[in-house]
Image: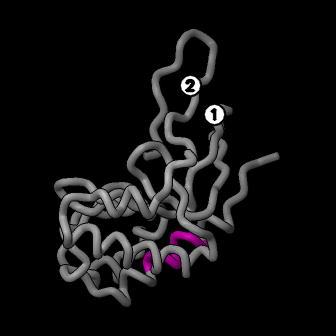
């Protein structure tokens, strides 16, 4: 989600994942798997509650909530959702960034896979929803504390 294309020469690559006008509800309702559709609607409620922001499509497949501006030491900067998810064919991908840094919570979560910033779950019934809510809240709180340098 946070990747951008390669840079050319001295120019800084533009972030490919941007907010769109696509309707997130229509996107979710078009998901083929009934379980992923149901879980996606539940994730919308959870993430909307955690951020206080409505869902917005970021690119063609990410449902994001809120916005976070980042800037790296290299000067590269951009905007990403505070949190979000994508109902992929293989699994639900949740973008939780720093929310995944709590090893004790991750241990209690249930069946999942994780990479730096991304949580992969097959279905919400595989995880402890209270722990998932806490992970999302931590992600949002930590990103809201971070501010890109002026």
At horizontal 57% and vertical 48% (from top left) the residue drawn is 21
Q: Is residue 108 left or right of residue 75?
A: left
At horizontal 68% and vertical 33% (from top left) the residue drawn is 75
At horizontal 37% and vertical 55% (from top left) the residue drawn is 116
The segment highlighted magenta reads 135-141
What residue sits right under mark 1 in the picture? 76
State how far apart marks 1 and 2 are (Cα).
Answer: 8 Å
Extreme residue toward the top, this view? 9
* Residue nearest the observer in this picture, 49 or 72: 49
Instruction: Provide residue 30's location: percent of width, then percent of height.
Output: 30, 57
Label 1 crowd (10 A; few <14 / some 14-19 / many >=20): few
Q: Is residue 138 left or right of residue 107?
A: right
Relative vertical location of residue 28 with respect to residue 39 in this rendering, above or below = above
Tell me where residue 3 sits by quadrant: top left
Tell me where residue 50 sits by quadrant: bottom right
- Label 1 residue SS: loop
Q: Which mark is residue 13?
A: 2
Q: Is residue 24 magenta?
A: no
Tell me where residue 135 sits by quadrant: bottom left
Q: Which mark is residue 84?
A: none
Q: Is residue 140 magenta?
A: yes
Instruction: Provide residue 85's location: percent of width, then percent of height.
Output: 40, 61
- Check if mark 1's residue and mark 2's residue have beta carbons within 8 Å: yes
At horizontal 54% and vertical 75% (from top left) the residue drawn is 48
Viewer-side label of 1, 2: 2
Extreme residue toward the bottom, this view? 130
- Label 2 residue SS: loop
Instruction: Provide residue 120's location: percent of width, then percent of height.
Output: 26, 62
Label 2 crowd (10 A; few <14 / some 14-19 / many >=20): some
Instruction: Provide residue 114's location: percent of width, then percent of height.
Output: 28, 62
Q: Is residue 122 left or right of residue 14?
A: left
């Amino acid at each position: 989600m946070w990747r951008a294309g390669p840079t050319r020469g001295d120019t800084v690559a533009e972030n490919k994942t941007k907010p769109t006008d696509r309707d997130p509800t229509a996107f979710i309702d078009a998901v083929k798997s009934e379980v992923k559709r149901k879980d996606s609607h539940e994730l919308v409620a959870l993430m909307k509650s955690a951020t206080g922001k409505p869902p917005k499509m970021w690119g063609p497949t990410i449902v994001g909530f809120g916005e976070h501006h980042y800037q790296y030491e290299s000067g590269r900067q951009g905007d990403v959702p505070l949190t979000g998810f994508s109902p992929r064919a293989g699994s639900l991908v949740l973008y939780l960034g720093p929310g995944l840094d709590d090893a004790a919570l991750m241990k209690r979560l249930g069946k999942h896979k994780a990479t730096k910033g991304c949580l992969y779950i097959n279905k919400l019934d595989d995880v402890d929803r209270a722990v998932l809510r806490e992970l999302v809240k931590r992600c949002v709180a930590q990103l809201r504390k971070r501010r890109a340098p002026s």
